[in-house]
Image (spheres, rainbow, N blue to C red):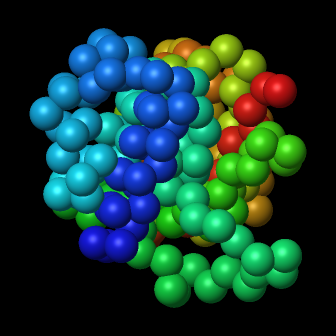
Amino acid sequence: MEKMNKNIGQNIKRVRQERKLSLDKTAALTGVSKTMLGQIERGESNPTVTTLWKIANGLRLSFSSLISQERPAVTVIKKKTIAPLSENEGQYRVYPLIPFQPDKQFEVFAITLEPGCVHYSESHHRGVEEHIFVNEGLLVITVNEEVFEVGCEDSIIFEADVPHSYQNNGPKPVNCTVLIHYPS
């Protein structure tokens, strides 16, 4: 996890410096305090998924661009080797499988929601779409106050520039794959 935190910090600092943004300006854009941003940049903090989304949305970046590392031409990704980002005491876990690349305009995550878990997501920037494929369980998605039930081997696609949430009301974990597509 320490390696991931250092990588996240380096990516945020690189983007901030490329854009000539001070920590104060970055804090104003993202809603994350200057102190917290400094701790994240130094790799001293373990930021939550929500905090990373605030930073990504505020800087108009993909989520995985904050956690990405350089990759070779061929990469085999094994979920069991990926340290998840988690919230709600581990009830909501995000595994970054395929990081964002500017020429591809998408990123892919595996997400696990334990029974009873609800995760609220802030609006992404305009034009962002989520494509969710449920692998196990029944996922309840609320998009702009409209509720959808997406069962095992079913999918949902929606414009993610509105508030949305993911919920597991069932007795077993929900596992899904999420592709987030960004406008060019």
* Image location (x, y in percent) of residue 151: 66, 54
Residue in view at x 44 percent, y 31 percent: 16
Q: Residue at x 51, y 86 (%)?
A: 80
Residue 131 seen: no
Residue 154, given in percent of the width and then of the height, sits at: 76, 54
User: Relative to 180, is 109 above or below?
Assistant: below
Quadrant showing the C terminus: top right
Question: The N terminus lies in which quarter of the figure?
Answer: bottom left
Residue 149, image x and y in percent? Answer: 61, 41
| Left/right of residue 16 with respect to residue 177 in the rendered view | left
155 vs 172, left or right, is: right
Q: Can residue 42 be spotted in the picture?
A: yes
Furthest residue toward left: 35
Closest to the observer, 58 or 110:
58
Numbered marks: total: 0
User: Taking 24 as reference, is 139 left or right?
Assistant: right
- Of residue 46 and residue 143, the one placed in the foreground of this image is 46
Question: At 57% across and 50% down in the image, what residue appears?
Answer: 64
Q: Residue at x 19, y 27 (%)?
A: 34
Horizontal relation, residue 184 to residue 111: left or right: right
| Rendered image quadrant of residue 73 | bottom right
Quadrant of res 43: bottom left
Image location of residue 181, percent across then percent down = 75, 38
Compare residues 135 and 180 and report the one nearer the observer. Answer: 180
Q: Is residue 106 above or below residue 75?
A: above
Nearest the eye: 131 or 102: 102
